[in-house]
Amino acid sequence: MTRRAEQESVDVPVRRAAAEAHPNIALVKYWGKRDRTRNLPAVPSLSVTLGALWTRTRIGLEPGLEADRATLNGEAVSPPQLARVRSTLDCMRALTDCRWHAQIESHNNFPTAAGLASSASGFAALVVAAAHAFGLELEAERLSELARRGSGSAARSIFGGFVEMACGVRSDGADAVARPLLAPSDWPLEVVVATTDTAPKTVTSTDGMEHSATTSVFYDAWVARADADLLAAREALAARDFDSLAAVSEASCLKMHAVALAARPGLLYWNGATVDAVRRIRQLREQGVPVFFSVDAGPQVKAVCLPGYGERVAMELGAIPGVGDTLVSGLGDGARPLPWEPFP
Ligand code: DP6
């Protein structure tokens, strides 16, 4: 922190703040909502937070602003994303006397909206920065609840390491929050992110879930089995049982995509390189490399492996035609405030 920034953070009443959050990869997937208005998940989920990728967000509350404004990597955010930002901030304004609107600037160090969980780190960073700017002292659980209003997976990015998200039963959503299970150092797995396409996905997670819930014949079976998958993943974590975690994670991923594929019309998030990377990961495992795959609502492939195997897996995946960048990440910490620096 510069001397000036340090001085200001002490002397100036907090009306501006900054925060950083990391995206997460769900091993047990969230796919489907029990309430769209409050954004309540229909199933529980379990994720790992990725240390190497981040969103950094600065927020300034200004009395003269007529509406919240937001940019991401220097560009105005899309109208649907801005609407979510505004409604998340409305929930926070309702907790304070401050009615000021916000000027928000976010930066991602990874492709946005291409199935790399940019909304997860984005909304987690937003609520942490905004809570600070509004002068709200909130427990992590409440921050998780607010982040969930913006994007379900963002509730998990409030925490680091291995994180569980409850679907809850309450209609107000107060129990649909995440909680940390293991710190990054408790089981320092590595995650390789293999990018196969950097274009934004054509069907967002929100729309894909809605379409799956209303048209996929597999949707009810998916919801019915979710608790059992969560339990299996929790047990695998507690025992540090990599093979069991691999089995339940790949099953959850493939089931989620099966639900989407069985929608009418079917949703196909994968491309050819996605399939090749998934096959290669299975081959590697047969050859004794401790690695499993996960794919979200986009074509990128994430390979989760035991410590020390990330570079080898990244090299193998990088050699597949159609795979672009590969990146090896350790597990990351939860969202945290950053020292204020003026917008560049
Ligand atoms: C496939 O959290 O992006 O990545 O709540 O509608 O914003 P909304 O959905 P979002 O969905 C994430 C879906 C997923 C699986 C997961 O992260 O659990």
Image: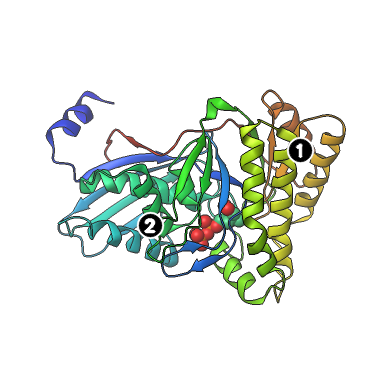
Front-most of 269 and 161? 161
Which colouring convention does the figure follow?
rainbow
* Label 2, residues with CA under 10 Å away: few <14, some 14-19, many ≥20: some
Q: Which residue is mark 1?
A: 317
Quadrant position of ligand 1: bottom right
Q: Quadrant of residue 216?
A: bottom right
Q: Secondary structure at mark 1?
A: helix
Residue 327 % position (x, y): 63, 35
Give the mark nearer the N terminus: 1 vs 2. Answer: 2
The amino acid type, in three-letter code, at marker 1 is Leu
Front-most of 11 and 331? 331
The residue located at (73%, 39%) in the rendering is: 244
Contact (Cβ within 8 Å) of mark 1 with mark 2:
no
Q: Is residue 166 left or right of residue 92?
A: right
Q: Quadrant of the C terminus?
A: top left
Residue 35 % position (x, y): 47, 69
The residue located at (40%, 49%) in the rendering is: 144
Q: Secondary structure at mark 2?
A: loop
Residue 156 % position (x, y): 48, 46
The residue located at (63%, 47%) in the rendering is: 231
* Distance between mark 1 and mark 2 Cα atoms: 41 Å
Q: Is residue 179 left or right of residue 11?
A: right
Is residue 114 at all visible to an observer of this figure? no
